[in-house]
Image (cartoon, helix red, strand yellow):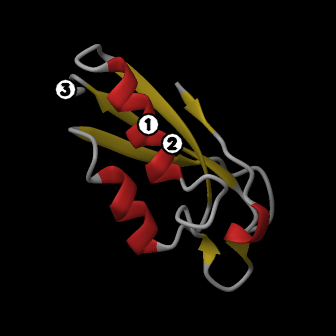
Amino acid sequence: MVVAPPWGHALSKDSGLDLRRTQPPVAEAVDVTTAAIGHHKLLFAIQVWETVEPGSLAEVTVRFPWSAMKVYDMNAPGQNPGLLLATWGWAAT
């Protein structure tokens, strides 16, 4: 499941990406999806930015048994995209 809602005003040069300010908030998209799929196993790929507001990241990652974030060094520092991978219904080993 790819989660990449429009960032709108969620991305700031100072604080980075706030996953609570996307439309819809990332945690809400995760909750709706996991409620619909029940006990099925799923891998989430959530679009992030090099700097993510720590509280908003914690609010999302607490929902999963396993998660890992990777930032891709493609641009100038502070301007790099990333991906948060997270499992639902299983844990990576």
Residue 10: which numbered mark, if any?
A: none
Please give left or right for residue 22 compared with residue 63 in the image. right
> Label 1 amino acid?
Val
Q: Do callouts 1 and 2 mark residues in contact (Cβ within 8 Å)?
A: yes
Residue at point 54% right, 41% down? 46
Of the image marks 3 and 2, the number of the one nearer the N terminus:
2
Tell me where residue 68 appears, x and y as whole percent: 38, 44
Please give left or right for residue 31 compared with residue 38 in the image. right
Instruction: Look at mark 1 in the image and give the residue it sits on.
Output: 32
Closer mark to the observer between disc 3 and disc 1: 1
Q: Looking at the figure, which quarter contains the C terminus?
A: top left
Q: Is residue 74 above or below residue 11?
A: above
> Label 2 amino acid?
Ala
The answer to whether residue 35 shows anywhere in this view is: yes
Please give left or right for residue 42 compared with residue 5 in the image. left
Residue at point 21% right, 23% down? 90
Instruction: Look at mark 3 in the image and give the residue it sits on.
Output: 93
Instruction: Give the class, few, some or many, for how many residues have Cα within 10 Å of label 1's Cα (few <14, many ≥20).
Output: few
Closer mark to the observer between disc 3 and disc 2: 2
Name the residue nearer the viewer: 50 or 56: 56
Q: Secondary structure at mark 3?
A: loop
Q: How many marks?
A: 3
Name the residue nearer the viewer: 37 or 76: 37
Instruction: Look at mark 2 in the image and give the residue it sits on.
Output: 29
> Label 3 amino acid?
Thr
